[in-house]
Image (spheres, grey):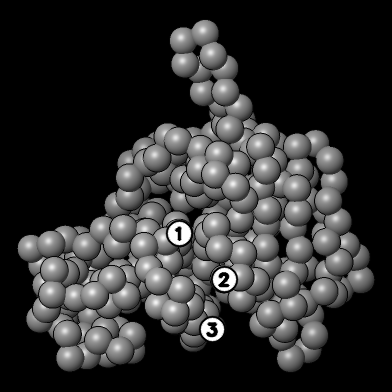
Amino acid sequence: MLEARGLTKEFDSGTHHLTVLRDVSFRVPQGALVAIVGPAGSGKTTLLGLLAGLDTPTRGQVLLDDADLTAMSEDQRAQLRGAKVGFVFQSFQLIPTLTAIENVQVPLELRGDAGAASRASALLERVGLGDRLDHFPSQLSGGEQQRVAIARAFVNQPRILFADEPTGNLDGATGARIVALLEELNRESGSTVVLVTHDLSLAERTQRVIRLSDGAVVEDRMTGSGVHEEGGVPGLSTTEDTEISAGGAAVSAPATAGGASAVAGAVRDPEAS
């Protein structure tokens, strides 16, 4: 489970004081597929960096499987990311001198896991690139590169995957296929997927949408996608509303509205986007 508790992020630049995030709180149960949306400058990328332990908040806490990321050292957070977290980026972040299969093997080799080649090959087969194992990124289309990046993110079986605008550099049809692939892998693996996107139509394909504006949560709702057979939402009460702090105000999301069902490093983006 991922939990944000009262996250606030502030920056000082000369005489200017900037509050990028304001008292953001929510919980994401294991196996959920969640979209974080909002206009440019709303704090989406900053929030993603805090949730992934790439940065620390000015105030507040981030808990992953009850481990408090904000109480850890940078080395401890890096170790946790290597063990439990996967990343997918807008710009793919593939290593240009490595083939597709070698790129997917990187997280496993950094951890010293055995059988890296066979696991990487199996995942590339799963994402439809079994005939591209030995191709370099420059020999792949944008959609194919993003599928390699998704295979790399899932290869270490992360508890949670963060995807920052994964369709931003792709055309609409290719982007829709990438989101469909994330949906399938989310269901198959049980990994939590937190997706940052500006594309509201893609966000509606997830199970839950958290909307930011001016650094605060202004909406948190179930979309009706991925309703579980029992009609419940994992991690949420079926008899009570879920209260989410949004800049000090409570936002209620009906608990019965619908279902809420991995590279070794990342680059911190200090900009709010």
State the CA–CA distance, disc 2 to disc 3. Answer: 17 Å
Mark 2 element type: helix
Identified at 72% across, 85% down, the residue is 228
State the CA–CA distance, disc 1 to disc 3. Answer: 20 Å
Identified at 44% across, 79% down, the residue is 173
Identified at 76% across, 43% down, the residue is 246
Q: Position of residue 248 (x, y in %)?
A: 80, 36
State the CA–CA distance, disc 1 to disc 2. Answer: 11 Å
Q: Are marks 1 and 3 in contact (CB under 8 Å)?
A: no
Q: Is residue 167 left or right of residue 64?
A: left
Q: Quadrant of residue 122?
A: bottom left
Q: Which mark is residue 187?
A: 3
Q: Position of residue 43 (x, y in %)?
A: 57, 41
Mark 1 element type: loop
Q: Quadrant of residue 198?
A: bottom right
Identified at 85% across, 75% down, the residue is 256
Q: Which mark is residue 202?
A: 2
Q: Which mark is residue 165?
A: 1
